[in-house]
Amino acid sequence: MTITYTADSAGFYSRLEIFPATDHPEDAVIEIPATKDRPAGKIKQAAHTHQILGVVWDGDTLARQGCINEFQVAIAETTFGGREENVNPKGLLNYPLLMTLALQRSKTAREAIDVMVQLVDEYGYNDEGESISVADKEEAWVFEIVGIGPSDDFSKGGAVWVAKKVPDGEISVHANQARIGELPEKNDPENGRFSDNIISHAVEKGWFDPNAGKPFHFGEVYDNPEPKTVRVCASRVWSIYRRAAPSQNFSPDYHRNVEGAGDYPWSIKPDKKLSTADVFALMRDHFEGTEFDMTQGIDAGDYGLPRRWRPLFWKVDDEEYAWERPISTQQTGFSIVTQSRAHLPDPVGGVLWYGVDDTYLTCYFPLYCGITELPPSYTGGSIKQFSWDSGWWIFNLVSNYANLKYDTISPDIIAVQQELETKFLALQGPVERTATDLVRTDPVLAQRYLTDYSVMQAESVTIRWKKLATDIFTKYNDGYIRGDDGKYPNVGYPEGWLRRVLRERPEQFKLPKRGL
């Protein structure tokens, strides 16, 4: 089973961290700091918590988020926000903490959902609407949750939620928009579940009329999608589906807000079984080859730059517009692709493929779920200061320099990316066969072997990217491209862009024709 995730936010600096397996005393608690709306609180700690690989990030406050645990349970999320009236500022749990506690206390995806439900019922949920993906060795689920609104009661429990299993052999996509529609059958807990208050809360708030003759639709009721959010969210769902199953000819009409166009299916069957490399590729997209191709047009500038600087929504003469919002975006802090595999022992089967910065120009490297150390270049540093010791900063340096001549420089980056990822995928089989044998004979040595391998490969990426940074800066300098012969021929601009310049300023650059 595989889940993917991009953590997209301005100035989002991530650091890898291991949350070790720990036994806790009976009276142990998790201290929750006070907010302006709520005094400090406490959550009872579990007697034992499982090891997790995850991230911490710095900003206004320190936060952490688990990604995969030692039993191959993986988790990720996307924020859809939903109705502001559902936020409960006095709840104790935000989504990163909820996800992390679920990983620490579960061995399967279903157990993780049970943990999240129990925790929000007891301690309250204080965040916006979230779609949370959970996968284990056998199945994958999506858990969508919103709060129940403000309360005068400290840490009042409760939330509205729905969980739905992704059918075997299919994929499902959510991108900052609630995706679960009609509720699963109540008598089919093998494929779906939901909270008892899911309809009554909506009726109480006046968001759903049970007598109107329309089926209850979770996303429409609790996310209340608007044309602008459909444009920038559903387009990414369409982008994955159109590439995973081109034979199904998915139309762009829904995300372009064409009247009468229906939403994209909850899940689809890809045209072929997806490899790990295929999933990496699905994470890399600017709508290339479609009418929305961000590398084309005047908005892509002179060198096909698929970046659109924020804000995403903008106005000219009181008319509102939106840039395209692709899967690959410059403000990605980190992204992951996970593997959870039943045919392998847990320390070998669970892999966190990790990359920093924009998915199109990142390089994914493998971290096995039971490792005991992490690569130093991805565990330190800060958003406040560039450092050559930080993989995050080196990747950002390279990709930002590529913005100068994207269509010319980015192929050099992608060549190195593919070289390294191809090597990692080729090594995966032999490495895992060795590790599986070691798990049977010497589990401690197996853990050491996988730790050393993971750290070595991650650090090799950092070293290679440092060299790539200096190579690119040397080759592409002052608007020239250094040739193999050491010369710097004139490059100029693409003809299509020059023609656009002349259309806007037809006389300014024209030279007079003089007779001999």
Image (tube, helix red, strand yellow):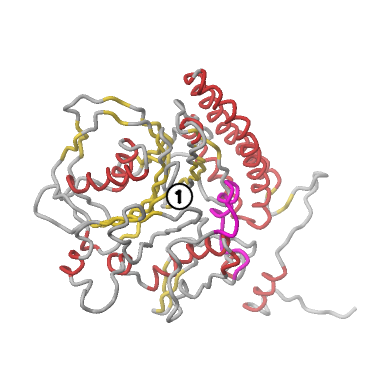
Q: Give the range drawn in magenta.
A: 270-290
Q: Confirm whether residue 130 shows in the render.
A: no
Where residue 117 appears, x then y in whole percent?
25, 48
Identified at 47% across, 62% down, the residue is: 237
Q: What element carries label 1?
A: strand
Where residue 55 appears, x then y in whole percent?
40, 39
Residue that label 1 marks: 5
Identified at 32% across, 57% down, the residue is: 188
Where residue 375 appears, x then y in whole percent?
50, 30
Residue 460 found in image quarter: top right
Residue 503 found in image quarter: bottom right
Q: Which residue is at the front of the view, 32 or 309?
A: 32
Rendered view: 277 above or below 502: above
Which residue occupies the extreme front position in the image?
A: 187
Where residue 304 appears, x then y in whole percent?
63, 62
Q: Confirm whether residue 276 shows in the render.
A: yes
Please tell me whether residue 30 belongs to the stretch shown in magenta. Answer: no
Q: Which residue is at the front of the view, 114 or 206?
A: 114
Residue 26 found in image quarter: top left
Amino acid tagged 1:
Tyr
**327 displayed left or right of 194:** right
Which residue occupies the extreme left position in the image?
A: 152
Assign the C terminus to one quadrant of the image.
bottom right
